[in-house]
Image: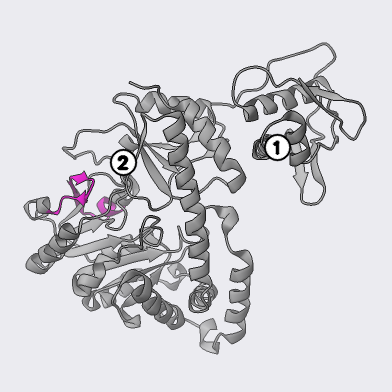
Amino acid sequence: MSGLRPESGGDLHLDLTGGGGARVRLMRALREAIHSGRLAPGTRLPPYRTLALDLGIARNTVAAAYSELVEEGWLTSRQGSGTHVAHRAAPLEPGRRRSPARPSRQRVIYDLMPSSPDAAAFPRSPWSASARRALATAPNDAFGVGDPRGRPELRQALVEYLARTRGVRTKAEHIVICSGFAHGLRLVCHVLRGLVAVESYGLDFHRSIITEAGLKTVPLTVDTHGARIKELPATGAQAVLLTPAHQYPTGGALHPQRRAAVIDWARATGGLLLEDDYDGEFRYDREPVGAVQGLDPDHVVYFGSTSKSLSPALRLGWMALPGRLVDDIVAAKGPRELWSGVMDQLTLADFVTGGAYDRQLRRMRRIYQRRRDLLTATLAERAPHVSVNGIAAGLHAVLELPPDTEQATLRAARRLGLALDGLGSYLHPDSMMPPRDGLVLGYGTPPEHAITAALEALCLALPGPP
């Protein structure tokens, strides 16, 4: 038992006994106080620090409990006015009691779906400044019918940026702006024929884009060093889609010998490497490995976008193409209604050339590295039998589970309000690889104040030691 004094007067006792961690027990106690009418609608709750000191728990625990109850509708919070009991959170009728509400199976409290960035971290002020400069300095022709390849300001900015940070060798006239990787892949599929080799573990959505274009995919085995390129010649494929910097989703990087081997294959067969560099800037244990494209620009289509670095809402991506493909890709792009907005392109060009993009990436690398470190430390303490696989990179991690536990773990996670993926859903249906049990967990989406609570809930869902 512990007490606090709300603004309405009188002591309010919170019973923090019962099961669960401190956050769970505090949320349960606050719900019960609201149910019973001891916390009336409109009551202002103490600041995090005050209540934490009074209850003898961590300030972050109080902050996480308040935040989750705000999301559930029990509390309201506004900057500068504190946290209050919501007016719609009416108490039960006198004498009527019920057990604390449990999250619905369908309700998502913690979004741990992989590879989405922290939306709250979008650089609003720097982006607004770039947008103002872009509008003020835009040439008149920017407001007419544009170039289907994209604005020249952005294409030139990307040439310089990609050469400096990713080792990409290209020219502005070989870059085509698109609305993201999926759009770019659809365009490239217009110029492909025959079979396309893909990694055995990958997004079914991407495989569907290829098959919808009338092409067939053939899987390559994936191990800790990425795709096994030695299997590629036997497939008869004319193109191969890879995620060399950070295999999606298993997390390995393509081994240097395999990087060289895929270029040798492309040169010998006239094949094409489709390089999805979806999160190449986010490497935490060393400097990022350069793109494979730099080894032979004539045999690689390089894809990049702002979906992980800034926001998927921008719908901005790019392709660095072999020169011989540019005209066909531009023709496939078609009506200008499908082109990316000019002002967003000009804004991104200013954002890149002015250094704001680099600053944002440095900032987010620190945030995501801290979250990944917290994930590994939490599992080492609470579930040492569950390992984190892959290199220290990106916005997601794969948690290796004991055999035959993936589906039960996903059900337990849903009951706790966790949204995450199972590894099994990424396996190519024609792959000969034995399925592995695991979770594909994103640590990019939860806001900073919620990541600790999200990992605590995750540990409750994980299976015990085998």
Pointer 1 or 2: first along the chain: 1
Q: Which residue is mark 2?
A: 426
* Residue 86 sits inside the magenta stretch: no
Q: Position of residue 99 (x, y in %)?
A: 68, 16
- Quadrant in which residue 13 is drawn: top right
Q: Which residue is mark 1?
A: 66
Q: Which colour assignment does the render follow?
A: one colour
Nearest the camera: 322 or 388?
A: 388
Determine whether 319 is above or below 174 in the image: above
Q: Position of residue 466 (x, y in %)?
A: 33, 20
Task: Please state which amino acid type lies under the numbered disc 1.
Answer: Tyr
- Quadrant in which residue 51 is drawn: top right
Q: Residue sitting at 83 percent across and 11 percent down?
A: 95
Which is in the foreground here, disc 1 or disc 2? 1
Task: Please state which amino acid type lies under the numbered disc 2.
Answer: Tyr
Determine whether 341 is above or below 374 in the image: below
